[in-house]
Amino acid sequence: MDNNNLLYILIVIATSFAIQAGIMVALFLAVRKSSARMETLATEVKTKAIPTIEAANAFLTELRPKVDVIVENVTNTTGMVRSQIQRLDATVSDVVDRTRLQVIRADELLSRTLDKVEHTTEIVQHTVVSPIRQVSGLVQGVTAGMQYFFGRRQNRRAREGMGVPQDELFI
């Protein structure tokens, strides 16, 4: 039985080698077919894509110095604009500060002027208006007294000399 077993084992091994050889041949044919397709694709890429890539590379190579100049100009312009804005900000701040000081001075001047006008009004009130009122009151009193005194005499003369009151003359 040992020989039979050995024979079966050899048949199984030979069969497995034959199957492996078949698989290897199939893999070889598949790789060969894929290789042919890859060569076709590689040729197509070489004919179509490589010229486009070379043109893009040449374009970028040509534009790079121009782009560098543009970037440098933008950087310089940004720096100049920033410095001008800082100067403008300083100027505006100075103008605002000066305006604020002038407004404060004007307010103080107006306050002092109003205080002086008020003080002058009080002085005029006490020194001029009050005595004038007193004199005016005195004059009005004297006038009223004189009108009363002279008015009595005129009323008597009017009653004696004229028979028609003056109101009746205006018709």
Image (cartoon, rainbow, N blue to C red):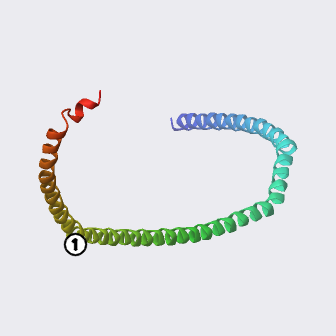
Q: How many marks?
A: 1
Query: Residue at point 26% right, 71% down?
Result: 119
Where, quadrant-wise, is the C terminus in this rendering? top left
Q: Is residue 14 left or right of residue 156?
A: right
- Give the image location of residue 129, x and y in percent: 23, 66
Residue 16 occupies which quadrant of the picture?
top right
Residue 107 occupies which quadrant of the picture?
bottom left
How packed mark 1 is, by other alpha carbons closer than 10 Å (few <14, some 14-19, many 20 or more), is few
Q: Amino acid at mark 1?
A: Thr
Q: Which residue is under mark 1?
A: 127
Furthest residue in direction front, as rendered: 161
Badge 1 element:
helix
Front residue of 162 and 17: 162
Q: Is residue 113 left or right of residue 56?
A: left
- Give the image location of residue 160, x and y in percent: 14, 40
Front residue of 153 and 99: 153
Residue 4 occupies which quadrant of the picture?
top right
Q: Is residue 170 left or right of residue 30?
A: left
- Give the image location of residue 93, x and y in percent: 49, 69
Query: Residue at point 53% right, 35% down?
Result: 5
Front residue of 135 and 89: 135
- Give the image location of residue 133, x and y in percent: 19, 63
